Amino acid sequence: MRFRIGLMNDMSMGALNDVASAQNTDGHAPEAKAPIVSATHNVETVLWVKHWTDQYFSFGITRPASFRFRSGEFVMIGLPGEAKEDGTQGKPILRAYSIASPSYAEELEFFSIKVADGPLTSRLQKIQPGDQILMAKKPVGTLVLDALLPGKRLFLLGTGTGLAPWLSVARDPDVYDAFEKVIVAHCVREVRDLAYREMFEHDLPNDELFGELAREQLAYLPTVTREPFTRQGRITDLIESGRLFADAGLSQIKFDPAEDRIMLCGSMAMIKDVAHMLEAQGMKEGSNSEPGDFVLERAFVG
Ligand code: A2P
């Protein structure tokens, strides 16, 4: 099994020393936030921030007119380095974030974890509308239809912020042309961690344009591991017990390599465990250059 997480971690860009936050180089807290300038990255404006819990938040930013992406791709985003005591500028901190908005949306949306001592998220969780952030000019990624062979059912399996790419993929009308059924399973520790539950359970089925597709072809299966809920257990447990399929209204009790395609995103342990299960059934990991039966990417951490 080839885990492509290297891609996500190794992309901390080298040529970023021309990124600067123009004002706070003297070590004093600026009165007003200085505009960010960058020759290598887009500088975008935060439009809104939604805090789900003390663990998770989402935010929207402006989308440059030239920025195109395929549903499920990720992009490096971040903040300029903080001013150091000697007056120099620290290196910018960028991390891979799955784009959570559909490809036709006017703005870009991201779903993030908050890590108290995380180099980026400790600061990013404090962003406010009007603030600026850095974004790479090009998105990349393997959680895309192009990396999968044709199939009948698409399973989008995610833990925690590993839901983010499914927010994009599951709102892409092309996905419903390509697959008869789309199953989103989101596994979290506690019920309150089920961010976007309202969107899946209420907004999408009632959406004027998207509602019919969602009602007929989309199944949303939230599951919780550390407190009582209508559906409990890890994604691996749901696969093994067959509940993943039964709750999606399917008659099968396990994956069918001929017809099922799977995307995985979230905790490394979950990805590894499910990938092993799929490989044991003879399914092959896909990539953009060589489409396969399943694709994976680790969710952003830290
Ligand atoms: P659990 O509560 O049993 O550890 P985290 O918050 O640590 O990112 O985890 C998100 C969810 O992923 C949790 O519900 C967690 O379950 C689940 N999880 C962790 N490891 C695995 C794994 N190896 N297989 C399936 N699910 C997992």
Image (cartoon, rainbow, N blue to C red):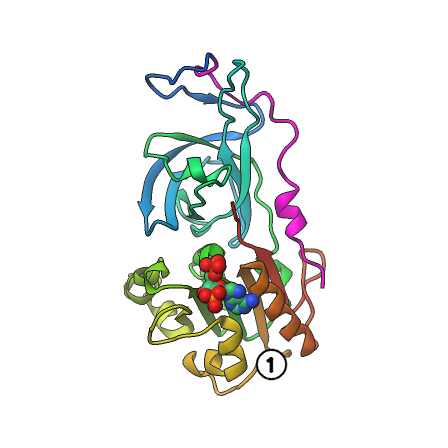
Image location of residue 300, percent across then percent down? 53, 49
Q: Is residue 20 magenta?
A: yes
Total marks shown come to: 1
Q: Is 181 left, or right, of 5 in this rendering?
A: left
Asked if residue 289 lies left or right of residue 180, the reply is: right
Residue 226, position as x, y percentages in the image:
40, 68
Identity, as a three-letter code, of the amino acid under mark 1? Asp
194 up-or-down from 260: above or below: above
Q: Picture coordinates of residue 211 (x, y %)? A: 32, 66
Name the residue: 52% across, 86% down. Answer: 252
Ligand 1 near label 1 (Cβ, under 8 Å)?
no
- What secondary structure predominates along the stretch shown in magenta? loop
Residue 18 left/right relative to 130: right
Q: Quadrant of the N terminus?
A: bottom right
State the SS at label 1.
loop
Sort mark 1 into few (<14), some (14-19) or many (20+) by Cα contacts within 10 Å: some
Q: Check the image and report above or below for 211 versus 138.
A: below
Which region is colored magenta? Answer: 1-25
Between 190 and 296, the residue placed more toward the observer is: 190
- Residue 144 falls within the magenta-colored stretch: no
Which residue lies under the disc numbered 1? Answer: 256
Q: Quarter-wise, where is residue 288 in the image?
A: bottom right
Left or right: residue 146 versus residue 64 is right
Q: Residue at x 70, y 77 (%)?
A: 282
The answer to whether residue 163 is seen in the rendering is: no
Where residue 220 appears, x then y in whole percent?
Answer: 39, 70
120 shown above or below 148: above
Q: Residue at x 52, y 13 (%)?
A: 87
